Amino acid sequence: LVFCRPNGQPIDHRADWQAWKDFLASAGVPDGRVHDGRHTAATTLLLLGIDPRVVMEILGWSQVAMLTRYQHVLDEMHDDVAKKLTSHWTPEPESTSNIISLADARKQRLGGGA
């Protein structure tokens, strides 16, 4: 047995199911199946940017295909990509500082312009 009671006997599946339901209720999250926890874990690790190989190891997978089955792309991820692209393609505002370099000051003094 993978999981058993301290005396080696099998865990009562009803008690295990109830412990899961109690855990969800105490965490204040919507009700779900135990298996839904694997999807949540995989998606949360994706959202955090955890390396896929590490996710596979944590969840006990040997095939990359499991990532596509369990990880779900969230709206927040789309928003993050849009923000990153906007930041990448939006030019930095020019400095409004009144400080100029020594070389530029010399050019101005010599009539070379800025």
Image: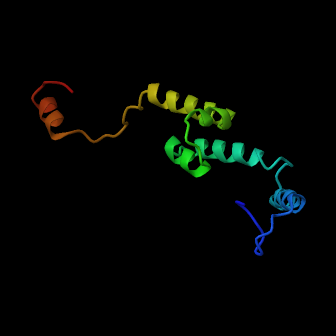
Does any portion of residue 73 appear in the rendered image? no
Q: Residue at x 12, y 25 (%)?
A: 111
Colour theme: rainbow
**Image location of residue 87, percent across then percent down:** 48, 31
**Image location of residue 14, percent across then percent down:** 90, 58
Circle count: 0
Front residue of 7/48: it is 7
Does any portion of residue 12 appear in the rendered image? yes
Q: Image height check: is 9 above or below 27?
A: below
Q: Residue at x 54, y 49 (%)?
A: 57
Q: Is residue 27 left or right of residue 41?
A: right
Front residue of 83/104: it is 83
Q: Image height check: is 18 above or below 107?
A: below
Q: Image height check: is 24 above or below 5?
A: above
Q: Residue at x 77, y 46 (%)?
A: 35
**Image location of residue 50, percent across then percent down:** 53, 46
Where is residue 56, by image quadrant? Answer: top right
Front residue of 49/55: it is 55
Quadrant of the drawing holding the N terminus? bottom right
Q: Residue at x 21, y 27 (%)?
A: 114
**Image location of residue 60, percent across then percent down:** 60, 48
| Direction bottom: furthest residue | 7
Q: Is residue 74 left or right of residue 90?
A: right
Q: Is residue 29 left or right of residue 105?
A: right
